[in-house]
Image (cartoon, grey):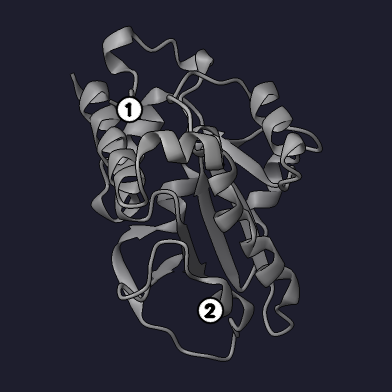
Amino acid sequence: MKSTSCSLILAAMVLLLTTSNGCKTYMHFKYGLTQPREETPAKLVSFLEKHHFPTENLYMFSDSLSYCQAIRNPVFIKNMLGHMIFDREGTLLQRDTTQCQWSGYDKIKSLSSDSTYEKCNGLRLDQVLAYIQPFGKNTTPGNVFTNSDFTVIVTWAKFIGSYNSRLFVLSDAVELNTTAQIRLIWLNVDMQESWKLKSEQKVAIK
């Protein structure tokens, strides 16, 4: 089943994340890493508030089909639990592959509309926007389409706990940037109760 294979991709990614930084028990106690489970918008907002993470500009996949279509894209899955920067034309900027997935603070802080950046083929901003919808408090559906010099999409997940702090710190880089108008989107990648997934479609960390 396609949804199952999509879930397995995410599970494999999570396993790599945890095993490369110590055992699962250590990750659980230090960062609050938990088994992926179905969430709701209310639970996600509560989690963000508890950890003092941003609660504006929140987005999620519209449904399980949108989620699976997105993560079947090799460029998107490569950037999962990380960030993507798109220029004004909606073209993805190339990331420095020698840096870890958490890097990006300095680049975002120094983005300039007058500078030229290396581009990456295989994924465009409009492709991502077609799959997502806003949620949470102070939701304004139209603001994602406002014209900006750059759009930064950060993908995060409740099940990686406080490890999300390495992602949410990028909001500081956006605020400190004085040379470009940057639109910031926090895209959640947790499974959702509203998707009505079958048991064999759900992610589990072994």
- For the N terminus, the quadrant is top left
Res. 97 image quadrant: bottom left
Work out whether residue 89 can be spotted.
no
Q: Which mark is residue 205?
A: 1
Q: Is residue 20 above or below residue 43?
A: below
Disc 2, disc 1: CB below 8 Å?
A: no
Counting every numbered tag in the picture gives 2
Image x and y of residue 186, in percent: 60, 48
Q: Nearer the viewer, residue 11 or 131?
A: 11
Q: CA distance from mark 2 to mark 1?
A: 32 Å
Q: Is residue 12 above or below residue 202?
A: below
Image x and y of residue 77, in percent: 31, 48
Q: Which residue is mark 2?
A: 107
Q: What kind of residue is marked 2? A: Lys
- Classify mark 1: helix, strand or loop: loop
Compared across the picture, whether 42 is left or right of 33 comes to right
User: In terms of sequence position, does the residue under pointer 2 or pointer 1 come before the other?
Assistant: 2
Compared across the picture, whether 135 is left or right of 86 comes to right
